Image (tube, rainbow, N blue to C red):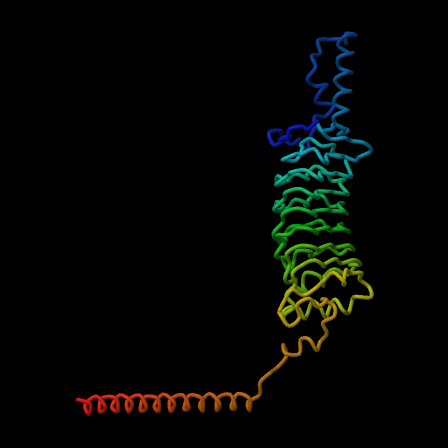
């Protein structure tokens, strides 16, 4: 039976600080020696607080087991609040989430895996991973991201795997987008809208082992030479989808595999003109301008002669 989409934006995100057991005890009346009934109420209240401290609450429509929270395929439009604070794996995949609120991951310092694939995300709030220092695996594939800014992965220095594939509107990756991700081993940028990628974005990743860049409309002009040269030098150490990476332009290399381009392919990018070349170009320009003036002069004389001849012919006929 088809269920209606479940908006969850009206719910409030849980604060990190929960009531302590001492606070609960201090709120109980203490008229004198403990009464058995009062003592029973106190014990039950303390047990409830201890349960809350453990952070084991599980949102509606999610399943929680062994520090794994699965909220996938629930047709959610917004992220669920009040997740268990000790969770290590959170899946929000296959929903309709368009945005994450700022500070959403602040309380979840044990988080290792975050799966956000197949949603409608167009970006992430700045500083989202400031407190998720143990995050190792991040999946943002099949979303609507348009660019990767410099602060997207700020402080997420533990990231080992990032999947940004199948974001068809992804046009730009900031040169410092992956700065500080020294442990990053797997990076997937395939099947996006990238025509250019700065060398600076990748050369600061010493641990990179797998790089996927196929399926993008690469423009293999002079600006791509530094990146391709760097990739060719790392091809033995870094597995890549070299067969799927093709040039979409310029026309002379359209359809050519990205990694088939050599230094010879960019020879025209290094042509320099000497003083003799400049003098020759200036001389040719001068000659062409003189020829143009002479041509215009001759055309003017010819037109004038034709006009006079035509007028004389008309006078003779009269």
Looking at the image, which residue is at 68% across and 70% down?
226
The image position of residue 131, as x and y in percent, is: 70, 43
Q: Position of residue 74 (x, y in %)?
A: 70, 33
The quadrant of the image that shows the C terminus is bottom left
Q: Nearer the viewer, residue 304 or 198?
A: 304
Rendered location of residue 34, percent (x, y): 77, 9
Q: Residue at x 68, y 17 (%)?
A: 27
The answer to which image quadrant residue 56 occupies is top right
Q: Residue at the location (82% across, 33% down)?
A: 66
* Left or right: residue 262 compared with residue 281: right
- Please determine whether, in this image, residue 286 is positioned above or below residue 106: below
As rendered, which of 139 and 107 lies closer to the eye?
Answer: 139
Q: Is residue 304 left or right of residue 220?
A: left
Q: Nearer the viewer, residue 153 or 144?
A: 144
State the residue lying farthest toward the front: 317
Q: Residue at 76% across / 34% down in the picture?
A: 69
The quadrant of the picture occupied by the N terminus is: top right
In the picture as drawn, the residue positioned furthest to the left comes out as 318
Q: Nearer the viewer, residue 253 or 315?
A: 315
Q: Vertically, is 191 above or below 59? A: below
Above or below residue 245? Residue 222 is below
Q: Position of residue 60 (x, y in %)?
A: 70, 27
């Amino acid at each position: 039976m088809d269920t209606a989409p479940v908006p969850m934006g009206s719910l409030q995100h849980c604060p990190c600080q929960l009531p302590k057991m001492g606070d609960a005890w201090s709120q109980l009346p203490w008229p004198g020696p403990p009464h058995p009934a009062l003592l029973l109420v106190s014990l039950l209240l303390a047990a409830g607080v201890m349960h809350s401290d453990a952070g084991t609450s599980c949102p509606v429509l999610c399943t929680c087991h062994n520090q794994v929270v699965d909220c996938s395929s629930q047709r959610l439009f917004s992220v669920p609040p009040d997740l268990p604070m000790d969770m290590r794996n959170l899946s929000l995949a296959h929903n309709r989430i368009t945005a994450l609120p700022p500070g959403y991951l602040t309380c979840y310092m044990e988080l290792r895996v975050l799966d956000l694939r197949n949603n409608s995300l167009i970006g992430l709030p700045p500083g989202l991973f400031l407190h998720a220092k143990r995050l190792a695996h991040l999946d943002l594939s099949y979303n609507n991201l348009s660019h990767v800014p410099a602060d997207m992965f700020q402080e997420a220095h533990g990231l080992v795997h990032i999947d940004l594939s199948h974001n068809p509107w992804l046009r730009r990756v900031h040169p410092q987008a992956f700065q500080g991700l020294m442990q990053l081993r797997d990076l997937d940028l395939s099947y996006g809208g990238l025509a250019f990628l700065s060398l600076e974005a990748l050369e600061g990743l010493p641990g990179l082992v797998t790089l996927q860049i196929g399926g993008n409309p690469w423009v293999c002009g002079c600006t791509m030479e530094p990146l391709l040269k760097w990739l060719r030098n790392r091809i033995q150490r870094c597995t890549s989808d070299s067969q799927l990476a093709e040039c979409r332009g310029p026309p002379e290399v359209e359809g050519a595999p990205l990694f088939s381009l050599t230094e010879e392919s960019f020879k025209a990018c290094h042509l320099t003109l000497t003083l003799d070349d400049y003098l020759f170009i200036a001389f040719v320009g001068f000659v062409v301008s003189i020829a143009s003036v002479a041509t215009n002069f001759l055309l003017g004389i010819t037109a004038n002669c034709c006009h006079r001849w035509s007028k004389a012919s008309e006078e003779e006929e009269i």
